[in-house]
Every structure is written in structure tokens, then in C-alpha cells.
Image (cartoon, rainbow, N blue to C red):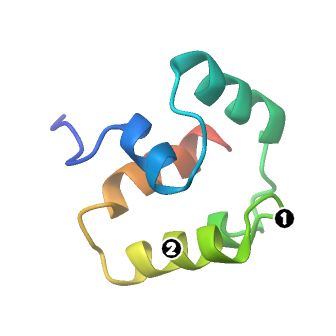
């Protein structure tokens, strides 16, 4: 499997969240499991700006899309 263009730490930085591995793990544990019927960008724990970024990156299939998908899978 090919590595994503951006690592998970960079996505968290882009979202304004702590980037340390322990903080990322804690975020995932705290917010998982995300209900199957809730789109990642619609999750209640995002700010409006974070949600807009996630939604835009997926819709545009931008270079962030692969790592956003990875985060989505981790939260399921």
C-alpha cells in the first residue's frame, strides 16, 4: 500500500489539533466509534472550520483526501 501524501500528524496540525502520537491516539479513542450513518465531517466534535476543511478535501479528492479517509476509518 502506498503511503498517503500527508501523514496523520500533518492532518492534525492542519485541523489545529495536537500532533503528538499520544494525543492523536487519545483523540481517536475518545471519539470512536463514530456511528456508521454519520459522515466524518458531520461528527459533532469538529469546529465549523474543521468540518468544512474535511468536507472540502473529500469532495475535491484533494491530496489530503487519502489521510482524511484514514482518519475516518480509524474513528469507525
The answer to which quarter of the image holds residue 63 is: bottom left
Q: Name the residue: 51% across, 45% down.
A: 12
Q: Name the residue: 72% across, 25% down.
A: 26
Name the residue carrying label 2: 53
Q: Earlier in the sequence, mark 2 or mark 1?
A: 1
How many marks the image carries: the answer is 2
Compared across the picture, whether 9 is left or right of 26 comes to left
The answer to which quarter of the image holds residue 45 is: bottom right
Compared across the picture, whether 33 is left or right of 67 comes to right
Distance between the Cα atoms at labels 2 and 1?
Answer: 14 Å
Label 1 packing within 10 angstroms: few (<14), some (14-19), many (20+): few
The answer to which quarter of the image holds residue 15 is: bottom right
Label 2 packing within 10 angstroms: few (<14), some (14-19), many (20+): some
Task: Please identify the quadrant where the N terminus is shown.
Answer: top left
- Image coordinates of residue 70 in percent, x first then y, are 45, 45
- Image coordinates of residue 40 in percent, x first then y, are 64, 63
Task: Please identify the quadrant where the C terminus is shown.
Answer: top right
Q: Residue furthest left?
A: 2
Q: Residue furthest top?
A: 22
- Label 1's element? loop
Which numbered dot is residue 44? 1
Amino acid at each position: 500500500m502506498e503511503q498517503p501524501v500527508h501523514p496523520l500528524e500533518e492532518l492534525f496540525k492542519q485541523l489545529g489539533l495536537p500532533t503528538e502520537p499520544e494525543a492523536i491516539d487519545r483523540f481517536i479513542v475518545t471519539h470512536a466509534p463514530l456511528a456508521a450513518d454519520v459522515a466524518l465531517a458531520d461528527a459533532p466534535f469538529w469546529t465549523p472550520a474543521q468540518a468544512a476543511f474535511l468536507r472540502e478535501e473529500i469532495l475535491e479528492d484533494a491530496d489530503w483526501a487519502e489521510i482524511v479517509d484514514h482518519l475516518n476509518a480509524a474513528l469507525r
